[in-house]
Image: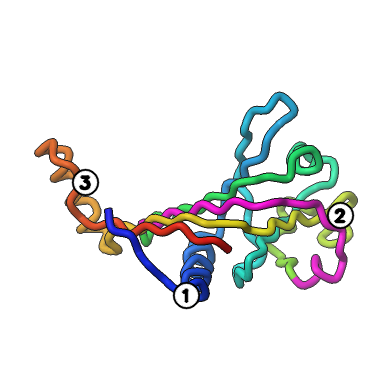
Amino acid sequence: MATHDTVHGDARTHVAQLVKNAQVAMLTTTDTHGRRVSRPMGLQDADFDGDLWFFAYADSAKAAQIATDPEVGISFTDSKDHTWTSITGRAQVVRDRAKAEQLYTPFLKAWFPDGLDTPGLVLIKVEADSAQYWEAPSSTTAFVLGNLRAAVTGNPHKDPITTDTVDL
């Protein structure tokens, strides 16, 4: 497994691109019994500057869990480009109409029928601490053939996978 060395700014830019390409995240919080709970969330701000933004309801389980334990994990998968990104950070529930107006898209109406006037609408802001990512060969054919070769021969996958851990 190869390690990808980057300068801090370049690494953040690279993570931002991986996140932007994936768009849908799995947000992991901790419930009142100490169990990890994950659910899909649509990322609202793809111009990743160290903060991730999601819309939610104030009375949702995730909002309550964040209030109790703000440490969260967010994972992204981009199956088209064969990348996986995992970000850790601290979350908070935010009531900021101006930020909500900036981030809102008509697509959200499926979950928030009254748009920005939906009762209980809040934002979840995640301040990222660190990220890890994995990148397989970008060619789907190379990726599939490499996995098939490994399965048939019993030898580990030989195609390079780029990895990095980045402090954000």
Residue 118: assigned label: 2
Location of residue 127 by image quarter: bottom right
- C-alpha span from label 3 to label 2: 47 Å
- C-alpha span from label 2 to label 1: 39 Å
Identify the secondary structure beneath mark 3. helix
Foreground: disc 2 or disc 1: 1
Identify the secondary structure beneath mark 1. helix
**What residue is shown at x 75% (from left), y 54% (from top)?**
124
Say which residue label 3 marks.
147
Q: Quick one: label 2, few (<14), some, or many (20+) residues within 10 Å?
A: few
Foreground: disc 3 or disc 2: 3
Location of residue 47 by image quarter: bottom right
Region in magenta: 82-102
Q: Do the residues labelled 3 and 1 touch (CB within 8 Å)?
A: no
Say which residue label 1 marks.
10
Q: Is residue 114 above or below residue 102?
A: above
Please, what is the three-letter code of the amino acid marked with disc 3? Answer: Asn
Direction from residue 136 to residue 167 in the image, left or right: right
